[in-house]
Image (tube, rainbow, N blue to C red):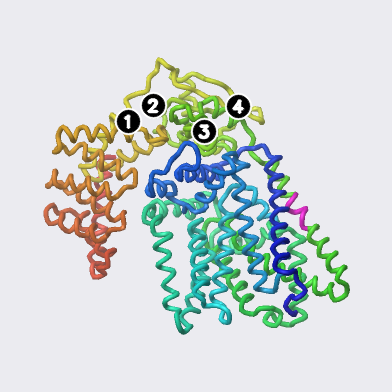
Amino acid sequence: MKRDRSLPQPILFWVVLALIWLVATACDRLWWAVQSGVPAWDQADYLNSALDHGRALGLIPGGAWEGWSALLDLSPKIPPLASLVNGTVMAVSGDAPAQAAWSLSLWHGLLLLAVASWGRRLVGPGFALLASGLTALAPALLDLRTDYVLEMPLTAVCTLALWRLGCWCDPQRGGRWSQVFVATTAALASLLVKQSALLVLFPAGLWAAWIAMGRRGSWLRQALVLPLMTAALIGPWLRHNWITTIGGTNRAVFESAAREGDPGVLSLQNWVLYPSLLPEQLGVVLLVVGVAGLLMMWGWRRSVASAIDDGWSWRWLLINLIAAWLFTSLSPNKSDRYITPLLPMLLLVLARGWWQWGVLLQSRSHRLAALLLGTGLLACCPAGWTLQLQRLQDRPQGPLEALVHAAGGADPNQLPRTLIVVPSTPDLNQHNVTYYGRRHGGQLVGRQLGGQRRDREPVLQSAEWVVLAEGDQGSVRKSARRLDRAVRESGLFVKVETFPRPNGDSYSLWRRRADQLAGLSFAHRFPSLASALSTGPAGLEPVFEAVGVEHMLDGHFLYRDVVRQQALDRLEQDPFDPNPRWSLALLAVLANRPQEASQQFAALQELLPDNPWPAAYRSVVLLAGWNPWAAAEVADAARTKTPNPLLDALADLSGVMAGAVWKVPAALQSVPLAVDQIEDSLDAVR
């Protein structure tokens, strides 16, 4: 097929593309206008993240700019780019879920821009507009435009990154400096939206590196752009949050896959799972017409190589599509959302099949071609419409907003408070309680307790506000039902109000009685817990167990300011007292401030020269702060004064991370010994 020449002029092309986006956005806004539900777990979590970042930027009531560290604190597991953009949009559009969803329309606009630009490079402007129309009609992408999760921004930025990377790799038109900067920025932006972008971009990156090594000229200097920009754009976030990121990825990928019973990577079910979703995700009409057109084109041309229009661009697209599908299928955790970053590439391929039908019909009649293609596009609409109607019926309904207002949420004049949420349902859980509680500058946060038996006593002793469920409790354990019963029967709480649910059940809001004061404050207990760190690993478990529960009871961490001021006051009275230093060190660790923690542990080394644990903790926090050289120096110096297996392991491990590869054999011996020591210490106190 000849390249498309009977095409709209450039201005008309962009006008038509803008119309596609406007019509799609109008449909999205209609959906948001007719739905009356509340965000469920994931959606509320991402709305909270956007609200957090908008507040941290000082754009949304209830927050203010507190520096880069405070901003990076808000994204401990998932990178912050989407939340920064979404929070900025929220500041302009409003913080209701439907208003916040305007950010999804902007991400969809970026996706259409990337698909259209890629389509122009593959065939031409007419094909690009057809591909953009199919992208706007695909049910899975329509779903993501009206579901507040990260897959729409991830899909948009991944598509942009792959297109721009292909432009740079093009053997005829690539290799320019402007291309490498744009491609690298787009690729890093994808990773700053969600780490799973690696599944899509990693094979493309390997191919791009191979191409770069085969080029002459400035390829080496261009290749240096990636590590330099990675250090500048991703380095600050990764350095600040690398520990929680690794832990969060493990839970999200491996533990979640095991818990949900996803098929194993070696099973047949695993490899047919994502292809089996395509009829629902793309619609039967779109899929059948596209595949039939591709088969017809292939049959006419006898080979894929002779059937393509721009050989290099199509090879780049097809190979990366297959490679990304392989990598995504190898990920243990499965979901229909996880394959969506690949759908724009697949839609470009299917659009080529649709385009082939247009070529066939156009040879007989231009009007007939336009009429039948338009009819085909209209026939794609019912698939997305049906899916949206199903989602509209499944949208969680409940009295969330009324309950939150009764607890003092969404009111900037109320003092910060924490609402303990015992049930966990799509229409009421800790995430959407927090979101609605902090709208309009409010200071109410929800926290989930009841998952373990040990939660019972802290709730009875310290909780001020509790929400319980009558009837369906949602996805909770038996211990949560026991906590529910304990709150009702304790006599410590009084029921404030009952809120009916659509299914005939209800939620009830409880508040601690005025004559039943909470027990000893955590700020009073904190110094003794912190001082127990001086005993080594044996003191760690009770500290972090107590802190974990307190962070549920006190979602605003109000105890920290009290503890810090008390510790500073004690240091003024006695600079040689180690106890306030332990408190300040532990506060710094909990706040993810390794440099501050290192300073406090250094002071404790001076105050307690015969205790090996301040040096061990200091070495650990220096490692957490990406300073293995200082960590190795601290551990090496300390083990000569106070020999200890853990210090030996930290010295060897830090040395290896600092580049002393000759210490690998020593680390292989010392690390297992240190692990045994820690396990023995923990067993002794259990």
Return the disc, 3 or 1, that comes first in the chain's sequence: 3
Secondary structure of the residue carrying numbered label 2:
helix
Secondary structure of the residue carrying numbered label 4:
strand
Check residue 289 for magenta coloring.
Answer: no
**Alpha-carbon distance for marks 4 and 1?**
33 Å
The residue beneath circle 4 is 506
Secondary structure of the residue carrying numbered label 3:
helix
Is residue 469 shown above or below 294? above
Q: Give the range drawn in magenta.
A: 380-385
**Alpha-carbon distance for marks 2 and 3?**
20 Å
Label 1 near label 4: C-beta < 8 Å?
A: no
**Alpha-carbon distance for marks 3 and 1?**
24 Å
**Residue drawn at point x = 38 percent, y = 25 percent:** 461
Q: Nearer the viewer, mark 2 or mark 3?
A: 3
Mark 4 is surrounded, within 10 Å at the Cα level, by few (under 14), some (14 to 19) or many (20 or more) other residues, namely some
Q: Which amino acid does label 1 sit on?
A: Phe
Mark 2 is surrounded, within 10 Å at the Cα level, by few (under 14), some (14 to 19) or many (20 or more) other residues, namely some
Check residue 384 for magenta coloring.
Answer: yes
The residue beneath circle 1 is 522
Label 2 near label 1: C-beta < 8 Å?
A: yes
Secondary structure mostly taken by the magenta-highlighted segment of the chain: helix
Q: Residue 515: x and y, percent? A: 40, 15
**Residue drawn at point x = 60 percent, y = 25 percent:** 499
Check the image and name the residue furthest to the bottom.
Answer: 216
Report whether 491 appears left or right of 279: left
Return the disc, 3 or 4, that comes first in the chain's sequence: 3
Q: Which amino acid does label 4 sit on?
A: Ser
Q: Which amino acid does label 2 sit on?
A: Ser
Q: Residue 90: x and y, percent? A: 56, 44
The residue beneath circle 3 is 437
